[in-house]
Amino acid sequence: MFYKLIRHILFRFDAEKSHYFALNALKLLKRAGLLRLITKKTVEAPITVMGLEFKNRVGLAAGLDKNAQYIDALSQAGFGFIEVGTVTPKPQPGNDKPRLFRLPAASAIINRMGFNNDGVEALLAAVKKSSYRGVLGINIGKNFSTAVENAVDDYLLGFKSVYQLADYVTVNISSPNTPGLRSLQHGDALFDLLTQLKASQKELQSVYKKYVPIAVKIAPDLSDDEIKLLSDTFLKTAIDAVIATNTTLSRDGVENLPHAEEQGGLSGQPVKDASTRVVRRLCELFDGKIPVIAVGGIGSASDALEKINAGAELVQIYSGFIYQGPALVNECAQALAQQG
């Protein structure tokens, strides 16, 4: 009830301004020692995936905390792990505003943020200042100014930069808001990128005496044939995990709603079925060889269970957290813990 009241107020204002206002409010409440009064204790249901032990199966998806400024506050919302970013090697402002739109009738969000972030050095400084000790994923991308044919340079630089502080690194090649980025999901470009990242992983493991898994985040807008080709490449390059899925370019389920015509990626309930389809197909193809982390349209415990039943090992939440707050995290974590 309390969160619904807060949401009602926040939803009366610009979506991006409200986003940062809410995060800064959480940060202040954390500093004042008051945040624990409005959140429940994190569900303890440990599970090991990618060689890492997660407190529970429910994580925060990348995009909410791009610069790792709010890790400590968000860790008290019940998440079993947190993923920050997408971060690029150099700071960039992202796309022109407005670039974030709510579709409350569909519990959905459209964004065309464009990897707005303060750059990898600023993110690393924030992580170092954090007191969070749970599993931390860092999501990396390429700068807008870097040509797609040179994207591997940005990913290698980002990977090397975050390696020592990340528990796992997510390679974001599926955002629809950076021109040409999704082309990296296909053919030789994907194989070359992943091969070079795995070689870098081996070198860095030797230097830091620490193995940091690589996850790849893919789009929901893929045909069965494309999913098969992706899975073949992931198996061939021994990727550690796949995150399925990012936002969709489809507008199925939101036709004629206010803001539905806005350009950008659609997240929330309308992407749920497409995401689950990709998760299920990937898990069938992987046959247990590569774990899948499911994200997309989780707005209830039953939605989270659906992803796990489709074969996912872990789930992540973004839009559902915006619409329902920490209660959703606890509800999903409890349900998944009871399932075992």
Image (cartoon, rainbow, N blue to C red):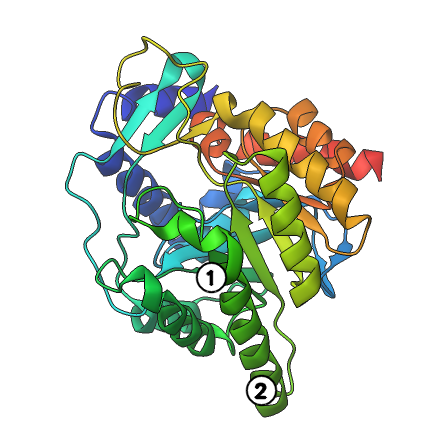
Instruction: Decide: is 52 above or below 108.
Output: below
Q: Is residue 221 visible?
A: yes
- Which of the two residues, 206 or 125, is positioned nearer the viewer here? 206
Please rate how many residues cluster around mark 1, counting C-alpha atoms within 10 Å: few if below 14, some from 14 to 19, many from 20.
some
Give how far across and how far down residue 19 sits, in percent: 30, 38
Q: Is residue 88 visible?
A: no
Give how far across and how far down residue 195 sits, in percent: 57, 72
Picture quadrant where residue 4 is located: top left
Q: Which residue is mark 2?
A: 203
Please rate how many residues cluster around mark 2, counting C-alpha atoms within 10 Å: few if below 14, some from 14 to 19, many from 20.
few
- Which of the two residues, 276 or 105, is positioned nearer the viewer here? 276
Identified at 69% across, 33% down, the residue is 307
Identified at 27% across, 13% down, the residue is 258
Say whether residue 34 is left or right of residue 144.
right
User: Is tag 2's residue or tag 1's residue first in the polypeptide sequence?
Assistant: 1
Which mark is drawn over residue 170?
none
Q: Which residue is mark 1?
A: 189
Q: Amino acid at mark 1?
A: Ala
In the rendered image, the quadrant that contains the C terminus is: top right
The local secondary structure at tag 1 comes to helix
- Which of the two residues, 40 or 328, is positioned nearer the viewer here? 328
Query: Circles 2 and 1: CB distance less than 8 Å?
Result: no
Q: Label 2, label 1: how many angstroms apart (C-alpha)?
A: 22 Å
Instruction: Decide: is 5 above or below 322.
Output: above
Give how far across and how far down residue 230 sits, in percent: 61, 50
Say whether residue 106 is left or right of residue 272.
left
Tally of marks: 2
Q: Amino acid at mark 2?
A: Glu
Give how far across and how far down residue 260 sits, in percent: 31, 18
For marks 2 and 1, give the one nearer the viewer: 1
